[in-house]
Image: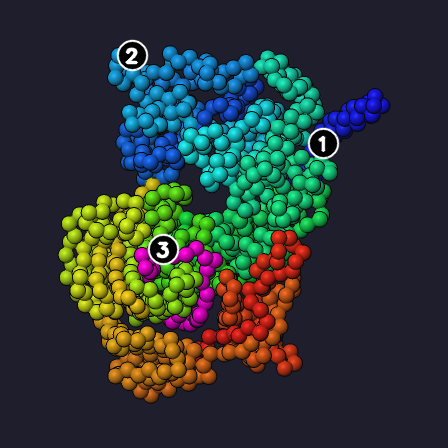
Amino acid sequence: MKLKFSLIHVFMVLMLLGQLEAHASRIYGGFYTAEKIANLRSNCDKYDWAAKQRARFIAQAKPWLSKSDDELWAMVPGQDLPRCIDVTFDRLTDGPKFLGCLKCGHEISKYGNYPYNPDFAHKPWKLTCPSCKSVFPTNDFGKYYQTALDEHGLFNPAKGDKSLLYNLAHPDPKDPLHKYGVDDGFGYVNEQGRAYRFIGYYTWKYWRELNNGLNALADAFLYTGDKRYAHKAAILLDRIADVYPDMDWEPYSKRGWYHSDGGSNKGKIEGSIWETNVVQRFADAYDKILSGTTDDPSLYLFLQKQARKYQLPQAKGTRELFVKNVDNGILRTAVKAVFSKQIRGNQGMHQLTVARCAIALNIQPETTEWLDWLFVRDGGDIPGLMIRNFDRDGTTDEGAPGYTFMWGNLVSELGKLLADYKGYTKHNIFAEYPQFSATFMAAYRMSVLGISVPNIGDAGATGEVSNSYINPNFIAQGYFYTRDPQMAIAAYRANGNSVKRLGMDIYSKDPESLSREISNIVEKNNQGDGRSGLMTGFGQASLEIGKGTSGIALAGNFGRTIKHAHPDLLNFDLLAFGNWLAPDHGYPEYATRWPSNNEWTGSTLSHNLVFVNGHPQKEVWGGHTRMFKQLGGFGAFELDGKKAYPDVKDYSRTMVLIGGPDTSNAYAIDIFRVLGGQDHVYSFHGPPGTISNEGLNLTAQEGGTYAGPEVAKGTLAKGFPIGYSHLYNVKRDIKPPGQFMLDWKVAAGYRNVKEADQVHLRMYTLNQADDVALADGDPPQNKPGNPKTLGYVLLHRAAPVLNSNFVSLFEPYKQSPFIKSVKRLDDGKSMQVSLKVEHVNGTVDYILYNPDSTQTMRTADGVKMDGVLGYVRQKQGKPVKGVLLNGKQLSYANMNLTAAGPVKGKVVKMNRELKGGGWLLVDKALPTDGSMSGAQLIIDTKGNRDACYSIVEVKREGNLTRVYCGPITFISDYKGNDYQGGYLYDFEEGAAFTITSHETWQ
C-alpha cells in the first residue's frame, strides 16, 4: 500500500511538473504566433493604414499605461460588488417592470435601452441621466467602497461604514432627503419598495471598461512590442484570474435583477449570453500579450507582493505561476462554465468562447480535447447546427436579421480560427460544409434596393433605413475561403465600388494581396450586383422597380416566427423615396417577456397582416413560395402562410408591384386570402403622420382602446384578443362602404423626411368589411429616432364560416398622386380579382388575378385571361404592355398573348449528400439555352422548409434534365440523436415541381 501511495504521489508530482513545464515552455500564444506578430510589426512600418492602426491603439492604451501597478490591481472588483444592466427593471414585480429615471421618469426612454454612460475618469461611481442631467447616487459610494474592502482586497458589504450612506447635498439626518438617492450597492429603495440600482448598472459598465482597458494594452503591445503594455495587461489578467472562479450572476438574478441570461438565471460577470464575449476578450488579450511577459522580474515580484499582502491562496512570483493562474482562473474556469451551461449564448457564441480559450491555452492534449467538443452532438454540435439550423441562404433559424447574421459571423470566425491554428487539423468548417459559404453574402442579398435590410423581428428600429449589417470585409473573407468571384464583386460593391482597405490581412507578409486579387476580378467582370429578390431559405421576397433611394420596393417576409422573430408570417413593408412607409416596429423595448413586446410589438396585430380568430400566429419555421417573378417594371409573388394558422384552409398573400408613369414611382397591389375561421381583422399601418380619408363615416370612441371604451391602454389581454388594448384613439365606421381611400401624409422628421418633401402613402381598400376602425399604436419608445405613434386601419369581418379576400392598392407619392382612380371590376363574391387603375396622365392598367386558373376571366372592358395573373397597360385605348404569369392566354384589343402555362414535372433523382451541390434530375425536358437561369424551381414538400430553389444551370442527361441550383444541399437535418443515422431532406424523390411561366407583350 505504501508503494502504491508513493507511486500515486510521484505521478501527481510529475503531472504538476509537466503542467508547470507546459506553462514555462509557452512563449507565444496559440493564435498570435511569432510569424504573425513579426509580419504585423513589419507591416506597420511599411503601410500608412497599418501605422494609423498602431497609432490608434497606442492612444487608446495611453491612460491605462499611466496607471500604477497598484492602481490597476485594485481596479478589479469581486463577486460581491453587485451588477445589472438596467437601473430599475425588475423581473419579479407585479407592478411596472421599468420605472425610468428617479427624477424625470420615462423621459429617459428616448435615449435607448442603456441610456447611462458613466464618466469613469471624472465622475467615478456616478450615473448622469442624459435627459434631466440628474446625477445618482447621491452618496459618495467611492469612499464607502474603500471602507468595505476585506483582507483579500475585495468588496464586502458587511464591512462598509454605513455612516457614509447619506445624500451629500442633504447631510442633516433630519432632512427628509437625507437618504434620497443613496445606494449601498444594492440600490436606492423608494417608498413603494422599488429599487434604483445605480451602482449595479455602473459596475456592469465598469467591468466593460476594464475589459476595454485590458484589450487596449494588449493591442498596443502586439503592435509595438513595448513590454510596458504587456506588463500592465498582465497585472489586470492576473487579478481577474484571482476573482473570476467565484464570479456568479445567479444570486443577483434571483433578486429579479436583469441581465443577458435568456431567463436561465445563469452567468458569471455578466448574464450567460453576453459572458461569452467577456471571456473571448480575456482570452484574446492573454494570447496577444503572452510573449511580452517573459523576462519581467518586476511583474513577478509585484504579483508576489500582492499575494502576500492580501493573503491570496494562489502562489505568485514567477512567469510560470502567472501563466498557470490565468490558465486555471480564466481559461479553464470559463470552459468548465461553458460545459456546465453557466456560460451559454446564441449559437456560435459559446462555441467561439471554447475555441478562443483552447487556442490561447495551446497545451496538448487539452486544447485538442476542447476543440473536439465543438463537433460533438451534446457539445458544440457544429455538424448539427450547420445542417439543422443554417439554410441555403446562409441564414439560420433566427428570423431577425441581426441575430441570424450574428450566427454566420460567429461560426465563420470560428472557422477562421480553426483554419489558422496549425495545432488542429481534424476539422475545417469551410471545406466540410460548402453551403455555409452563402452566409458571407446573406446581409448583402437581403438589402432592399441596395439601401436597407428590412427591420424584421427584433432588429433595427421603426422605419430605420440602414445597411449596417453589411460588412464588405466579411464578404471579402468569404471570397478568400471560397474563391467565388461573385463574392469579390459583392465585396467591391458593398465597399462603395472600391477596393480601398478591402480584405487587408495585417498578419500576412503581403497584407494587400487579397485586395489586388479582388480588383483584378472586378476589372474583368463588373456586371450585376449579386442581389436577388427571393431568399427562400431565409424567407424574404422583394420586388423592386428602380434603384437606390429613387426606387420603389416591396419586401415580404415569410420566414421564421420563432426565437427573435415575431409572429408576422407574410408581413410586408414598402420602401419608397428612401423611406420605409409601412414600417415594422423593429427591435422591441426589451427582448424579453415585457407587455409592450409580448402583446404589441411582438404580436401579429401590430404588423401588416390578417389577425385570425383573435389569436396570434403559431410559431413556425416559415412559409412557402407559390409564385415569384421579377420583370422590368413589373413583379409579383404569392406566398403560402397556412402553417401560421393551421386551422384555416388558406392563409396566403399575393402582391404585385407595377411601375408608374415614370421610373421614379410605382404602386402595389395586395390580395390577402383567408379561408376559414370566424373572425378576421386586416391590420395595416402606414408611416407616422396625419391620415385623411375619402368614403368613411368615422365616429370617435369615447376613451379606452380597440378592446373597448372601458379597457385602458396597455391592459394585459384577459377576455379580449392580444394587441387590442395597445390601439387607442379609436374611430369607427360600423357600416363602411365596399371601397374607400386613406392617405398618410408623412410627418416631417420621420427618419430623413423633410416638410418640403410632401411624402404620402395612399391606400385604396377594395373589399367589404363589417366595420372599419382607425387607431393609434405606439412603436417602442426607447429607440432613438422612433416615432411617437403610428396610424392603423383595421378592417374587421366576422361570420360562423368565414372566407375573406382583402384587396388593397398602395400608392406612394410626393406632392401629388399619379393615380386618378381605382375600381374593382368583379363582384367580390369569389376569390377572383379584377382591377382598373386610371392614371392622372390617362394611362389605364388592368390587373386580373385568378387562383383557380381553370376558369376564364373576362372584364366588361374586354380583357380576357386564362391564367393566374395578368396585367395590361393601355394608352389612348390601345394596349402597350401585357404580362401573363402561369397562364395560357391574355387578350385585349389587338393584343393576344399566348403561353403554355406553368412548367410541371417530377423529381426523379437528387444529390443526397452534403457535398456536390444542389443538383437534381427531372422528367421534364427543359430548355438548355439559359432562359431558365434565375427561374424558381418550386417543389412540393411536407417539410418545414420552403423547397423552392433558384435555377443556375440546365443540362440534358439522357431522357432526363439535370438542374443545378448552386452550391447548396437539400439536407435539412440528421436522423436520430447522433450524426450516424443518415439525413432528412427538404423534399423527396418523386415530388412534383412547378416553374412559374411568364410571357410579355410590348
> In which quadrant of the rendered image does the N terminus lie?
top right
Q: Which mark is residue 26?
A: 1
The residue that appears at 29% across and 27% down in the rendered structure is: 192
How crowded pointer 3 is (Cα within 10 Å; few <14, some 14-19, many 20+) is rated as many
Residue denoted by label 2: 173
Q: Is residue 451 visible?
A: no
**Magenta-drawn segment:** 609-637
Secondary structure type for disc 2: loop
Contact between marks 2 and 3 (CB within 8 A): the answer is: no
Q: Amino acid at mark 3?
A: Pro
Q: Is residue 923 above or below residue 520?
A: below
The residue that appears at 56% across and 80% down in the rendered structure is: 924
Mark 1 vs mark 3, CA separation in Å: 57 Å
Residue denoted by label 3: 616
Query: Along the line of sight, which residue is nearer the eye, 65 or 567?
Result: 567
Is residue 199 toward the left or the right of residue 917 in the image?
left
How crowded pointer 1 is (Cα within 10 Å; few <14, some 14-19, many 20+) is rated as some
Q: Quadrant of residue 287?
A: top right
Q: Amino acid at mark 2?
A: Pro
